[in-house]
Amino acid sequence: MYALVDCNNFFVSCERTLDSSLENKPVVVLSNNDGCVVSRSREAQALGIPMGAPAFKYKDLFKEHDVKSFSAKFEYYNFKSQQVINIAASYVDKADYEIYSIDELFLDLTSFKYVNIYNYCLEIRNKIMEDTGIPVSIGIAPTKTLCKIANRIVKKYPQQFEGVYVLDTQDKIEKALKWLPIEDVWGIGWKLGVKMRDNGVHKAWDLLQKPEMWVRKMMGIHGVRMINELKGIRQLELSGVSPKKSIAVTRSFMEMLTTKEEVRERVETFAMYCSERLRKQNTCCKMITVFVQTNRFRKDLPEYKKAITQILPNPTNSSILIGRVANELFEAIYKEGFHYKRAGVVVNDFVPENERLISLFEKDTQNQHLPVMRAMDALNKKYGKDKVRLGSMSGKNTFGRAKLSPEYEAFLKNNTLPEANFRFH
């Protein structure tokens, strides 16, 4: 059996650990630059606030119902995520868990032959709540896809279950599949769900009634694996964290930028962050892309967007070298007279740090820079992000968060948080 440990309304739950008065009140967390809703409490959902809602469009509703809104505190969410992961992972062997996202991880309970799995997961849930203040739901089933369904049932009917639900019989599985809308099956989604409904597939159970050839034609081999997963035949094993194939740091600015030096500083800062992430996974990049873009929604202003890519003569993860190239690319695409709203740096075409092939005709300074880079990374890990940085970096917040609570500011003064390293949903 697998178990999926999923944090409930994770970002909101993190906010409530900072301020307990937020319990049972409508709360939303906003994205970068306080633009859109990325997490909602149950109370906020009940008011009809959709996920991804532009905050400015719901400003009056927020005021009318006293909805508390907060800027996303990604460093803190990562901090709490690590706490949850460490507790859950301590209940299984080292290789028997998979971190799926910042608020989800799978546990492999196959070897627990003589343990009451329901009670065991209830203990995990209670321990996480006691030590971190984060409520979690745990879905248990023979496959990862069925775990997702079990978890959805727990969250849909919180009053009927104590945060844990087990799909351990064919009757339970059949009942769950007949209840679940097809677009809510893990791997289907809204777009494919429309096609499914056009072909008479409205529930997950309906998909099992279709011939394999139809499923293969509609979704390929992925669909056949999904069918087996829904039947309780394991197709998806736990997987470890693999190095990324590309790294991108992009931001929309809180205010449109009109001066060259302001945009340049942002681009160089993004390049530094890419370099840090490369060193974190012990890889070097061979290709760098820089782009700038105006606000496409402002039809009253001239529009401009441009991207440029350069292949490096030698692979590197040096902040100095990558920053230098990013600056050269920025110079090539920047144009005066525009209001810039967005910029970014992307690095890709990776090689392992210890397998670099060096050009005989180009000077290689990677090895000279590496000790300095490692020392800078170590100091930032110990004392906090951007405490030690290159001179071209201003150290300004790149997320544009204006709604940080006093409780969070106090927390930052007394804690050093690790850099966030998850995909945020």
Image: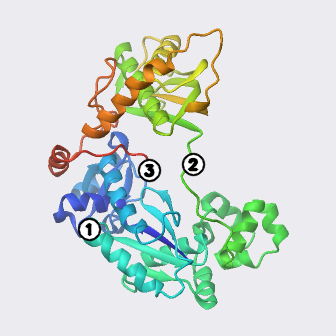
Q: Residue at x 24, y 37 (%)?
A: 383
- Please state which of residues 81 and 35 is positioned toward the viewer in this rendering: 81
Q: Residue at x 53, y 30 (%)?
A: 346
Q: Quadrant of residue 368?
A: top left
Residue where numbered disc 1 is placed: 131
- The crowding category of the residue bearing disc 1, from other C-alpha atoms within 10 Å (few below 14, some 14 to 19, many at least 20), is few
Question: In the displayed structure, does residue 323 sit left or right of residue 379?
Answer: right
According to the image, what is the colour scheme of the structure?
A: rainbow
- Residue 247: image location, x then y, percent: 52, 36
Looking at the image, is mark 3 or mark 2 nearer the viewer? 2
- Residue 134: image location, x then y, percent: 31, 66
The three-letter code of the residue at mark 3 reads Phe
Res. 29 in view: yes
Q: Residue at x 58, y 88 (%)?
A: 172
Q: CA distance from mark 1 to mark 3?
A: 23 Å
Label 1 close to label 2 by CB (< 8 Å): no
Looking at the image, is mark 1 or mark 3 nearer the viewer? 1
The three-letter code of the residue at mark 2 reads Ser
With respect to residue 180, does 288 lie above or below? Answer: above
Residue where numbered disc 2 is placed: 242
Label 3 close to label 2 by CB (< 8 Å): no
Residue where numbered disc 3 is placed: 424
- At mark 1, the secondary structure is helix
- Residue 190: image location, x then y, percent: 60, 60
